[in-house]
Amino acid sequence: MSVPLYQAKAEFFRMLGHPVRIRVLELLQDGPMSVRELLAAIEVEPSSLSQQLAVLRRSGIVTSTREGQAVVYELAGGDVADLMAAARRILTEMLAGQNELLAELRESEVAAR
């Protein structure tokens, strides 16, 4: 029995639902990075980063290659970068709407005095 598409999408977004995984995806938009570079940029425990990278690798969103002693990660495809850009646009719109609402509330507060 196959999984309904909406359930598969929910699983995909749950997989993305961790701050370290999101940060890794943001960083990899600029190109491949070694684990050492990712650790320096994210400032988490190596074991935590390793765990989150494994989740991303199992999902097929990132790939890894060994270059000498270093393991280098990169996005598996450009669609992930597009998704991150879309999320940024959506958040920007949401926050702009919240700022407008906050401004209206402040104006009504001043008018009520």
Image (spheres, helix red, strand yellow):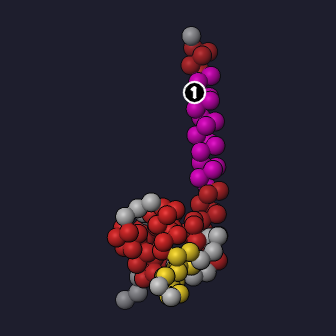
- Give the answer, above or below, for where 113 lies relative to 82: above
Corner quadrant of residue 31: bottom right
Instruction: Tell me if residue 103 is in the magenta stretch.
Output: yes
Instruction: Tell me if residue 87 is in the magenta stretch.
Output: no
Residue 70 coordinates in the image, percent (x, y):
49, 82
- Give the answer, above or below, for where 46 lies relative to 57: above
Which quarter of the rendering shows the C terminus? Answer: top right
Q: Nearer the viewer, residue 84 or 4?
A: 84
Residue 29 coordinates in the image, percent (x, y):
62, 70
Which quarter of the rendering shows the N terminus? Answer: bottom left
**In the visual, does 15 lie left or right of 63?**
left
Residue 101 coordinates in the image, percent (x, y):
59, 34
- The residue lying furthest to the top in this view is 113
Residue plotted at (58% across, 32% down): 102
Q: Report crowding for label 1: few under 14, some 14 to 19, many 20 or more residues within 10 A (C-alpha).
A: few
Residue plotted at (64% across, 63% down): 85
Q: Main secondary structure of the magenta part?
A: helix
Circle 1 sits on which residue?
105
Residue 52 coordinates in the image, percent (x, y):
40, 71
Quick check: can you spot residue 82?
A: yes
> Could you say whether the residue bearing mark 1 is in a helix, strand or loop?
helix
Corner quadrant of residue 106: top right
Q: Which residues are magenta?
A: 90-107
Quick check: can you spot residue 9?
A: no
Residue plotted at (59% across, 45% down): 95
**Mark 1 is on which residue type?**
Leu
- Give the answer, above or below, for where 2 lies relative to 50: below
